[in-house]
Image (tube, coloured by chain):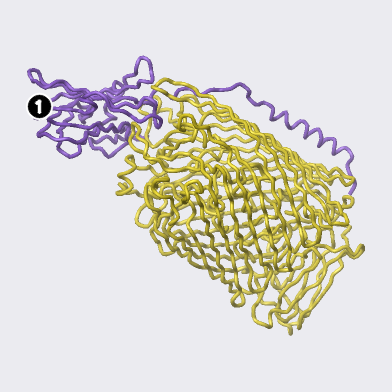
Amino acid sequence: MHLHLLWPAGLPGGRRWATGRGIRPARPTRRLAGRAFAPHFFWLTGLLVALAASQLPGTARAQAAPAGGAGSTSGAAGTANAACTLALAGRISDHETRDLLPGATARLLETGEVSPADALGNYHFHVCPGVYRLEISFVSYRTETVEVRVSSSTVRNFQLHPDAVALGGAVVRAARMAAPTTLATNTLNGAALQATRGQALGEALLKVSGVTAIQTGPSVFKPMIHGLHSNRVTLLNNGVRQEGQQWGQDHGPELDPFVASNLSVVKGAAAVRYGADAIGGVILAEPAALPDTAGLSGEAHLVGMSNSRLGAASGTVQGGSRRLPGLAVRAVGTVRRAGLAAAPGYRIANSGLAEYNYAATLGYQRDRWGAEVFFSQYNAQIGLYPLPENARAAQTDVPRVAQDFTYVLSRGYQDLQHSLLKISGFYRLGGGYGRLALTLARQWDYRGEYDKFRPRNANIAAKNLPELDYRNLTTTAELRWELPIRRTPAGELGGELGLSGTYQNNTYRPGSRYFMPFYTGQALGAYGIGRWRPRAAWLLEAGLRLDRRHLNTRRPTLPGGVFTVVEDDFAFFTPAASLGTVLEAGPHLSLRADASVLRRAPAPNERASQGVHGGIYEEGYDITRPPGTAPLAPETAQGLSLTATLHDNPRFNGEITLYQTQFEGYIYQTPVPEVLTIRGLFPSFRYQQTDARFRGLDVLATARLLPGLVLGLKAATVVERDLSRDDYLILAPADRAEAWLRYELPLRPATATAGTPTPGPARFSGFYAQAGPQAVARQTRIPRPENGQDYQAPPPGYVLLNAEAGAVFGAATRYPLRIGLSATNLLDVAYRDYLNRYRYYLDELGRNLTLRLMLRF
Amino acid sequence: MKRNPIAPKYLALLLLAAPLAFSACKKDKEEPKPADDNELITTVVYTLEAPAGSTAPAVSITWEDRDGDGGAAPVVTGGTAGRLTLQRNTLYTGSILLLDRTKTPADTISNEVADEADQHLFVYQTTPAGLLNIVRTDRDTNRLEVGLETTATAPAAGTGSLKITLRHQPPMANGTRIKDGTFGPGDTDVAADFPVTVQ
């Protein structure tokens, strides 16, 4: 059974310590291995999934089992010399039924290496000669540990016994929102995620090849996938589409990365599943599943950064109820505070931030149904560099006031609050009818933006209210019906159907300034995805979606100084269709292809935003469109992406993604001559529409040079063409590449002569260190002056040196402590980045050292 | 594990009840209101009176942006065809008027500036430098210049431009005064450019 098609996110499970290798290409099941940083927690969670599943008729067990080559990541301890490439492999099956057990976990206790069983129940390792203890575990089965002497390639099969005892505490876990498998999907979790703790979400995601970010100063990062951003990247916060962050490029995602245990990036148009906005891709921030066992557990994080003297602390406490099995709670709290960041040579004025976030989850699960209530709130004050008043003069000669370090935020800052209430539930229909899942959510988004200047009127100034003061209220509902897998002579068939609705209302405080209009948006959508697996190693997926979007905007104007409200109504059907395939061309090679076509209705900011905001003037297309021309029309995108992934090889692994997205009516911001206001000239941008084509390439490759020593390479390029003008588009990410050498302390197996290997709890394990350069070229593909002259030529390319090291102390104890130290821009190079909106004025950050501590309990 | 036959019903109830929690959507359509009064200065008028007995006429020039940021570009009117045209070697007496002409009648913002003179400074800069010599003649309660009232002379014939900047220099939150008679502290509330001809 390969019901994992419906459940690609599948079973959490690998008990893999200290083998995080940075970013790995995540195949659907690869996410499994990555969760390994939380061994007990996830393992137990996984146990519950399968336990629960195993009691369901028919399909259940397979649902819990992610198959299809759940790969270990070729193991930290793998060695490259000939003697250490002996295969230790075998097949894991059920002792009673002889069913294969894809997703079962094989673990070498001596090295900590993990190999989840693939679709055919196979595990395999590459090891040195020696004696190993091999532990085979799978949810709802009794764990077996055997000693294996390896002197040549060895095959060892296992038949696991169902564990009657374990069935006692069965709880069904809600399925995670699954990433589409036919697109390249990269996941940050475990050690790789840990190495980003303390950073903003958009900054953390920069680790994924093909992902960049539009920056506004040092603390605001808006993720960009394959050159697409803002309204074309959907962010799912715990399964709910994050709303309110689409107003501007200076809006970072309003969520706390500490709440997530997985950050996944789906690269490419995933609009059928996630809605028409997901042209560029999808970012999924997913918390871990709730604990299933009684008793408290959790983790505590401490992060300190040298550059901005940032301090972050985050704690998670969770527990299951002893008296009411299936009831579990979790609470997460985070505080983050930073002072002025430093570019080489000077402090960046007003670049501090203060943030506190919290989240709580209450869940109750039975075998056929479950329900969960989740609430989270993000609160942040983010300082904005005071842009000089005369934009043009300032670009040539920046009048920079000397700044002493301070944590104090002065005017010119964003004051944000985002709250999410989510109620979700699922119900297994039984009788082979699949599963229903319902998610209801409401989001409150408050965005106050304080201008640098204070109101002239002292009474108003005394109130200290933000000049832009927006409220966005969004209610969403989604119903999904996950169809059961049907086995037919032609292969397995499955799929899902969904309905979704959104109601959104956006206003601003009376008396505050107009930048975005008042608007009301409604969207109703239906989609269906069909999956066909003609062979075990081959999956075909087709999807269709249709949305109806209605938008009503009310915006003030002052024609000749007279206050007038202009109301507009827009309604569009936005269809989307996709066709994709995954072929496991061999045990180490996956091929993916995906084609899609979709439409996206223009967002309110693209139509009707207007004003100066953070020292930059922006204007929607409809505001000053030439008389007689039509308002902004939906854009149509045709996407094509091809991905090849080499995985689980002892020496060489990698992923390459080639893509093209072609737009009719691509909506983008372009510089216009500086708008003159009563306060002077401001850099000014206007939305407009053109036909465009994006073509690009992402590469990730790792090669094991010596035992424990890996050379990695990551590179991305994207070419953005304006087809109507036969020119390039502005603000395309420059070509970039990163190389690193990573050393992981090899965990030596017990010697063959020892007879009784005694691995014991290592006090110090999982050590790794890596260093390498990161190079970004000067962007030379820019529009000709007549097609949108930027205020300055793109900044020169740059090379930075980064390094990172980490280890776990007391990995086998009750309180493992993970310590990480990382350094960025080690040589303190002064540079500017083309994707920073303040590139006209400011250098990027200088050297930054970060210390991260994480204690699990 | 024993299945609980009641549980699904509870779940169904919960799921049905959940939308109620979300049904309190406001349906009435709210509309934007004008921004707070202080938000707009639409009009800057600089008036120069020649001394009694002089043959030079009084000059008044206006910089105006009535529809706020963006939209129609600001316009300069008055003077001689939109140029501030002055006679050389004449001691003019200047005064500034700031208006919010989105209100009816127009709101005189310069009165507000006068009331809070200790937080404001007008700065007069010409290109080329020395085209006009403008001296602030009024002072605030701290004996610092304000610049609502000025004198202006032009030493020689020429053309160029005059930038009038209003610096808003309110005390810091802790009460510390920041106005020190220089351009530096605070922010710009007005930055208006006028073309100038000296005959």
Residue in the foreground of this view, choosing between A854 and B157: B157
Q: Give how far across and how far down residue A87 sits, in percent.
A: 74, 77
Q: Colour of chain A?
A: yellow
Q: Give how far across and how far down residue A481 sits, in percent.
A: 79, 42
Residue in the foreground of this view, choosing between A781 and A698: A781
Quadrant of image for the C terminus of chain A: bottom right
Q: Colour of chain B?
A: purple
Indicate the quadrant where residue A419 lies: top right
Residue in the foreground of this view, choosing between A597 and A462: A597
CA neighbours of label 1 inside 10 A, class few (<14), some (14 to 19), many (20+): some
Vertical position of residue A288 compared to residue A128: above or below: above
Residue sitting at the far top: B105
Q: Give how far across and how far down residue A368 sits, in percent.
A: 84, 44
- Residue found 48% across the figure and 39% down from its top: A687
The reply, left or right, for residue A832 in relation to residue A256 is left
Residue A802 appears in the rendering: yes
- Residue found 81% across the figure and 61% down from its top: A535
SS category of the residue bearing label 1 = loop
Q: Give how far across and how far down residue A48 sits, in percent.
A: 79, 53
State the residue position of label 1: B90
- Hey, what amino acid is under mark 1? Thr
